[in-house]
Image (spheres, rainbow, N blue to C red):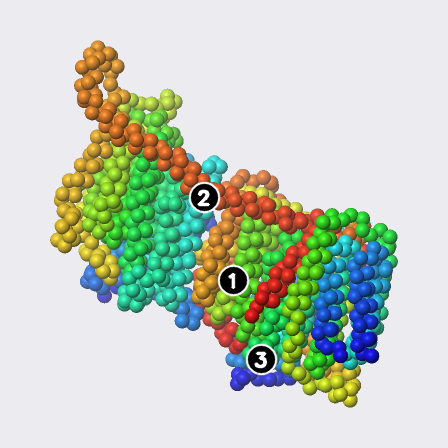
Amino acid sequence: MVEHSMLNLVALILLFPILGTAVNGLVGKRLKKETVSYIACGSVGLSFFTATLVFSGLLLLPPHERLFEKQLFSWIESGSFKAAAGLQVDPLSILLTLIITGIGLLIHIYSIGYMHEDKGYHRYFCYLNLFTFSMLLLVLGNNFLLMFIGWEAVGLCSYLLIGFWFEKKSASDAAKKAFIVNRVGDFGFALGIMLIFLTFHTIDYTEVFHAASQGNFPVGSFTITMITLLLFVGATGKSAQIPLYTWLPDAMEGPTPVSALIHAATMVTAGVYMIARCNVLYMLSPLTMTVVASIGAATALFAASIGLVQNDIKRVLAYSTVSQLGYMFLACGVGAFTAGVFHLVTHAFFKALLFLGSGSVIHALSGEMDVRKMGGLRHHIPVTYKTFLIGTVAIAGIPPFAGFFSKDEILLESLTYGNLIYWSVAAVASLFTAFYMFRLLFLTFHGKSRVEHHVMEHLHESPKNMTIPLIVLAGLSSIGGFLGIPGAHVMSTFLSPVFSASGHTKVSGAEISVHHGEGNPYLMMVVSTAIALTGIFIAYQMYIKKPELPKKLAERFRFIYRVLLNKYYVDEIYTALFVNPTRKIAVFFWKCVDIQIIDGSVNGIARSIGWFSSNLRYLQTGYVRNYAFYIVVGCIFIIVLAALGK
Amino acid sequence: MEAYLFYIMAAVAVVSAVYLIFEKNPVYSILYLVMILISIAVLYLLLGAQFIAAVQIIVYAGAIMVLFLFVVMLLNLSAKEELKDALSFQKIPAIVMGIVLLSAIGIILRSKIPLGKQGEYTSAYVHDVGNTQLIGKLLFTKYLLPFEITSILLFIAAIGAIILAKRK
Amino acid sequence: MITVTHYIVLSAILFTLGVVGVLIRRNAIVVFMCIELMLNAVNLSFVAFAHYLHSMNGQLFVFFTMTVAAAEAAVGLAIIVAVFRNKETVNIDDINIMKW
Amino acid sequence: MTNVSVMTFNILSVLPILVLAGFGMIVLFVDILFSKRLGDKNILAYLSLAGIIIAAIVSRGTTPIALYSFNETFVIDNYSLFFNFIFLLSTGLVILISHQYMKRENINYGEYYALILFSTIGMMLMASGADLLNIYIGLEVMSISIYVLTGLKRSKLTSNEASLKYFLLGAFATGFLLYGVSIIYGATGSFNLKEIADFLINKGDVTGPFVYLGVGLIIIGLGFKVASVPFHAWVPDVYEGAPTAVTAFMSVGPKAAAFAAFIRILMTAFGSTHYEWQKIVYVLAILTMTVGNVVAVAQTNIKRMLAYSSIAHAGYLLVALVAANTLGVSGMLFYLLTYVFMNIGVFAIVIILSQRNDGFMQINDYAGLGYKHPLLAIAMTLFLLSMAGIPPTAGFIGKFYIFSAAIKSGYIGLAVIGMINSVISVYYYLRVTVVMYMQEPVREFYPLTISPFIVAAVVISVIGTLHLGIFPSKIMELVQQSILTMR
């Protein structure tokens, strides 16, 4: 059985990164920088290689048998409760494993160049390897508790890496914030797991889902709804959804490759993975599905609108990530798990690309991140420009790039299974996405250079080990979409064993449209392309056309020119009607809702605990008699309770 | 007769206790405590616990209280107590608390106290065998283990007192 | 006729007076004496219960509490002496370096 | 009662106690007789460790049935054996971490080791007592030793003050405990836990509030020892003032012993009236967790912060007691074992980093530790993460069991409050790691003298914390066995 011997290698996938961590963490200080990077990249590379072996092993099996569990050791046994620590290979987990190790490898390579000058070189790679290990554990674990352990461990790594440049106060604050906000979500998650533990007497995926799909729980049962809602609370924390998203924009304080790997491609998608993994449970609770879809849609629109007005290149991408994650949740919420996972995959490609591209820009500009101080860079850093362009086109949803197919599928599914509101929200968010991404592209690479003089002198294209990952990712972003092209269903067929247990999950556009007349996939493609093009067009108008106008021309043929120039003022009307209000709303969302209400309440809770803490401590007066007094008060309370008894 | 003795001794004990907690001079406080101990010893006699009554007088009132007195004298505290009162505001609430505590216990005790399982040591039986003999017998049979452990306890107290009070 | 309730009420009164004493006195030795008063109140209720239950256990328990009280007295007074050596006071309101 | 064998005067059943008592005496005599020739008194630490190991050997293993001896006042069952293991382990670790500390602070008396061993005797008696009298005597043996240990640095005012506060409040709380015992005695006619339980099952309905009053008062007395709010006020001051090694000692063993007695009394004797005491413990648990965690946030002294954190941990353990089911009790035992490792580990590192006369006890003094002494910082981080309940550490599994038990018994609100609290706790544990890794050093780390003893303690704690976090099933099995014979 060659496939089984291949599948048995799965533990090695986990082993290599942790070995890398151990070596770099223990002796990295004394090693040369090259050695450190060889160890780090090598371990992830080996892990990726093993993952491909396991993947091919899985492909050799017939589709319905593609579930392989490797027990490691028996973990918790307490009476009727049992849990064994083990790894699970199925289409969903291996897909994510490939992404984590593959993109992880590229980002490790990229980091060699990016972090070259940093004094915490070995520490950085140690953390990065540890992150890879934890993320793999999260994905490959065969039960909820292992997932939770990975879940917490990636949070820890994210915390360490956001605060990597701890000399900056903002960095260590952002790290702390990320960790604590995540803990709020995790506590819902942990509660959900406990409820699973108590309801199903096991935390093993296979057993839980098997029990749930046996019809013991009616659709909409209270327990399942509670479980799924609690799990979703965890997802909102990790995947930065309303209201727990505030940490993600701040997380951009970390090194850019970290943002690419953790805060775009892998860790933040853990919530989507979790919901996809628990699709059986989620399908049993329509209420939760509605909540997931609504929060996803709201986040998609909300974050996209904030993205419209940001000037920090990484923050635009951060809000964009939040928004794209919203899409994935929308997809899951309407039952289109395949579409959600598909978007997860393509998003991993193009968002990693965009982040790395932005990192390359920042690298070229010696750390400048404000787009108002960029512009005209396309000739100076051509490789970065080209790859960034591909990434932008991909996220904007222009065929045939990756983002187009996945986003299109989500739009379609949200109309088919959801309703018009979901669809229109998603469509508007998609318009925004196209707009702000091209705005970013134009401001950065086109137009006149606004780069400061002394920075200009050092302007240079990034070294090979940074551009090669960019090119590879650009390639993936270009062709990645064909995995899910309507009609071929590579993705949905591959994933179907995972989602088949949960009722209506033959989730693919073409088949659905047979049963439902509403969504014609090809019409849909045209519509979504049109939306994306509109967004690009507006961006083009606002950021390329107007600033470039020579003033003299305008003065000579004042009237005619102006009318012509302004295309009979259609643009102005357009601007007045749509762009300005949108802009105002966006600013309002950002300044009031985001910064004051949501961020403010998170900080406010922390502050009020601090306030209570600093006041309650004064009860500790240091006087023995006060302490005795407390004891007597407690005693009277207890006696009163006793007197009331029976 | 028994009732009169009870009420007299109870009155003595309560009044002494009130004096104990309001008396300024610690030496007097000790004497009030000794009064309480003696009146309680009398109550023990009423309850047929001669051995405990004797121990109360000899060990408690005789030895332990003398130790207290000794320390008070040693530190020459008789005159200079009550210098600073940082918590004078606590006095009223404390007394209120005391009343509340007492009334709360009182509410619970309001009905007749339900006594537990009756044992075999009736007064007549104890009288026949002798209180001290019975206690001795129980100490070396049923309660041998705690009895032996108390030796460790007293040992701890001895070395503890030495190590804490020793000058450098 | 004196019932067990009489003794228990007396014991409760003495106990409460001891508690009040702990709350309002400042001399550490007197506070300690108030604690002794509480213990004696408890002892009284033990012996009373023992008598009315026709059981010897209560008396045995009192025997042990007295032993413990002796041990506590030795250690407690030693602690008070040690404090006095360093601080020249036994006023427990003066003894609060550590707080908050 | 088929699975009970009654033995009278079985000397074997108290063998660990005798061993410890014997070694305590030997330590004292060696100290007195050879004090001139002993030098740095390493031999005393060796002797005490030997005593602990021998005691552990004689009390190892499991027993299929509960063995009662001394007229059913003393019981050896898996439950008490498990607790004996916890006590011996914590005492052993404390001796390992305290040896160097005692020398540094110039209080390396032989009495220290003797008192620690005697105190452990008290704990064992509390866990094995099947009778309120034994539990009370055990409590006093344990407490009086600790009063003395707290004041061991007799020339230092903080130590004196801590000792006085602990002593006065301890005696005060014991008064309430005794009052409760006397009421229980009056209401049931016995001190024996089993007889009390039998009486309450048969005639419990006539006793009513009178018994509840007794139980409530016992809860006060034991609540004081486990540091439950509002009986907790002594904890921060005493923890801060006591010599650090003693703080480490009293934060683990005595707490576990008090919980051992707590569980045994409430579950065995008053199991039939649990609806009444659950209400009380419910409120106490919420108060304890919340006050402990919230106030810890504002602390700047690491010992005080750990004191509040230990209050908070008592709160989590009380949650398990409220749940009052098998899962809860086993979770509690498991948690106590993990608590031994993580807490002693933290204190070991605090001791390594502090200087003579308890210098460098502020959290800010740990700034930059991550770069100067990475291994110490990693170990410290591990212990703190475990305390915060973050996987894959032991603390996480413990919390998982405890909160699961609460949910299982239907106390979902309690579990939610507990978990909110553990989120708060992350904040202050994290602050230490932030200081260690994300701030520039504010002081020189003196050349630290790290003795092999203390290294051994840290290593054992690290292994324990990780092992219980990653492979908890073996221990959990043991724990489950140990509560089978209890009821």
Residue found at x 70% / y 60%: B98
Picture quadrant where residue A248 is located: top left
Residue underneath mark 3: D203
* Amino acid under disc 1: Val
Dot 1 lies on which element?
helix
Query: Could you tell whether B125 is left or right of D1 in the image?
Result: right
| Residue appearing at x 23%, y 30% in the figure | A538
Rounded to the nearest angstrom, the CA distance separating label 2 from label 3 is: 54 Å
Judge from the rendering whether residue D315 lies leftward or rightward of residue D103; answer left or right. left
Q: What amino acid is at disc 3?
A: Lys
- The answer to whether residue A499 of the structure is visible from this angle is yes
Residue D160: which quarter of the image? Answer: bottom right
Q: Distance between the residues labelled 2 and 1?
A: 27 Å
Q: Which chain carries label 2?
A: A
Decide which of D243, C64 is in the foreground and name it: C64
The answer to whether tags 2 and 3 share a subunit is: no
Q: Residues within 10 Å of mark 3 (few under 14, many from 20)?
A: some
Q: Residue D408, how many percent across, how many down?
A: 44, 66
Q: Where is residue A46 in the image (x, y as percent from the top left)?
A: 32, 52
Nearer to us of marks 3 and 1 is 3
Q: Mark 1 points at which residue?
A: D319
Identify the subunit bearing mark 3: D
Q: Which residue is drawn at 38% across and 52% down?
A: A233
